[in-house]
Amino acid sequence: MGNLKKIFLNGFFLICCCFFLSPIYIIVVNSFKGRSEIYENILALPGSLNFEYYVNAMKKMNFLNAVKNSLIVTLVSILIIVVLASMTAWMLVRAKNKFSNFIFSVFVATMLIPFQTLMMPLMQEMGWIRDHIGLPMLDTLGGLIYMNVGFGASMAVFLYHGFVNSIPISLEEAATIDGCNKFGVFWRIVFPMLKPVTVTVIILDVIWIWNDYLLPSLVITSKSLRTIPLSTFSFFGQFTIQWNMAMAGLTLTIIPVVIFYLCAQKYIIKGVAAGAVK
Amino acid sequence: MKSKKDLKWYILFTAPLIFIFVTVVIIPFFIGIGYSFYDWDGMPLNPKTFVGIDNFIKLFSDSRFLNTSVHTVIFTLLAVVLINLLGLIFALIVTSKLKTRNIGRTMLFMPYLIGGLILGYIWKFIFGDAFTAIGEATGMTSIFFNWLLNPKSALFALVIVSTWQMAGYIMIIYITGIQSIPEDVIEAANVDGAGFWQALFKIKFPLIMQSFTICLFMTLSNCFKVFDVNLSLTGGGPNNATEMFAMNIYNEIFALNHYGYGQAKAIVFFIVVAAIALVQVSITKKKEVSM
């Protein structure tokens, strides 16, 4: 291949990629513009960096509070999923019997159930638990986390199960002879070996929980408990006409995702690939 | 179980997750099947009337639901083809020897990480105000008009946004497939004088058959279940012309308060999704190309 042709192909591909991301560019540049400036030329860079709309959007969306709620829900849900699913999957593999096989196949089979099939009865059940047992399952971050763990369980158990199957049992046996109990064997020896799957589970669950809209919208009603997608939704209900402020709000919601992506790109792409192929 | 002690450990390790899982997934699933045989408006004090399979029979004469089914099928077919085509092309470029391949991969995968709801709002502006403005500036009003106000173009807008979201994700799966082809197979083909297209269709494609199946069914099931993008981009409009399956169920239950009837739809929805997945499993098992 000639040098010139190479440069041309590389450049052409890069331009295509930039075109692919142009919607994000349009949102970002127009978030700095006033209304008349938007209509003058929608593709042009802003005349000046005017952060007025960002300040307004942040206030109206209660953005920092939404970030805090999203962080709590995402981190705690994932922590519980990783701890409980890895322990469960390990036990299901190591204690092979009919019951373990049955439980595992139930976990796998339920991965097929779409959320829409469960949402109404789930809300009825959680309402019933609140009214009759007194546990605050609805309109609390704890309730949302509990349900996230339930919905994330299948996938995580499935991924851990496949991996535990492939690691030899001899190390664990040696540790048992040395006097470790099951708890020690699992946390000291097995869990560190599960790291690749743990990364995959974390990545897939971050993408899912951080962006999840429907479940939180059914569980959370208080303004102060809104996660980012919820506050974006209510924000757009009120400010559809004020596009400059709306775009500032959208840019704000994209920023955490971009930071996460740039920091963990290698793991994200590997994790997504591993999660899909299994 | 060898001893009582082992059993204790077994329960300690597995019971917490199984308990949460049963209360969140299993119990609602069975309650849901129950509800689908009742007529109920969701008010706790109002009576639930047992109607047997009437809810399921009603589906076939519900014109809004039938329209929704048609839209969902059209949307799904268009989106599956477009997503896989683009995803495959991206994957082939990104696995080539281009120097810009890594930065390209980074950029193309980006949209997948932004949630469907936010993607929908971004594109709502593009298809609405941005298109109108570009149309006025360039005079090409036959392409650049507000796509979301016309039933046909709104459906196509939904296809484009879903493609934008999923193509980078599907690309990652195709990349995994392409990278698992041994280098010497391609080299051997080159030595034997196979051109670019020949190597592509006769060597690469047959060897990534499994990736094809995974990607096809993954996009099929994801597009069929689309909700977030649908909600924020078009909200089902104009005139319910872009209301997809999932949104129709949501509206039936929570907007129209037809809890029993809506749940019956949700059960049908589950059966369709499960059928798609089961077909996939049986195909993947048969079709693996052995080397």
Image (cartoon, coloured by chain):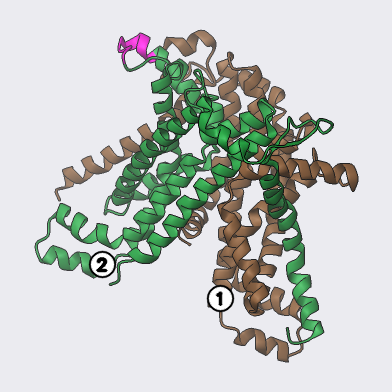
User: In the shown orientation, is residue B103 left or right of residue B207?
Assistant: right
**Toward the viewer: B36 or A17?**
B36
Res. A227 visible in picture: no
Q: Is residue B78 above or below residue B8?
A: above
**Toward the viewer: B182 or A216?**
A216
Q: Is residue B140 magenta?
A: yes
Foreground label between 1 and 2: 1
Instruction: Chain letter for brown, please.
Output: A
Q: Is residue A195 magenta?
A: no
Q: Quadrant of residue A157?
A: bottom right
Q: Are marks 1 and 2 on the same chain?
A: no
Q: Is residue B15 above or below residue B200?
A: below
Q: Which residue in the structure is indicated by mark 2?
A: B183
Between marks 1 and 2, how big is the CA–CA gap? 30 Å
Tag on residue A165?
Answer: 1
Q: Secondary structure at mark 1?
A: helix
**Which chain is home to disc 2?**
B
Q: Secondary structure at mark 2?
A: helix
**Magenta part of the chain:** B134-142
Mark 1 Cα shell of 10 Å, populated few (<14), some (14-19), many (≥20) = some
Amino acid type of the residue tagged 2 in the rendering: Glu
Number of numbered discs on residues:
2
User: In the shown orientation, is residue A4 left or right of residue B4?
Assistant: left
Residue A258 point in image, percent of width and height: 54, 41
**Which chain is home to disc 1?**
A
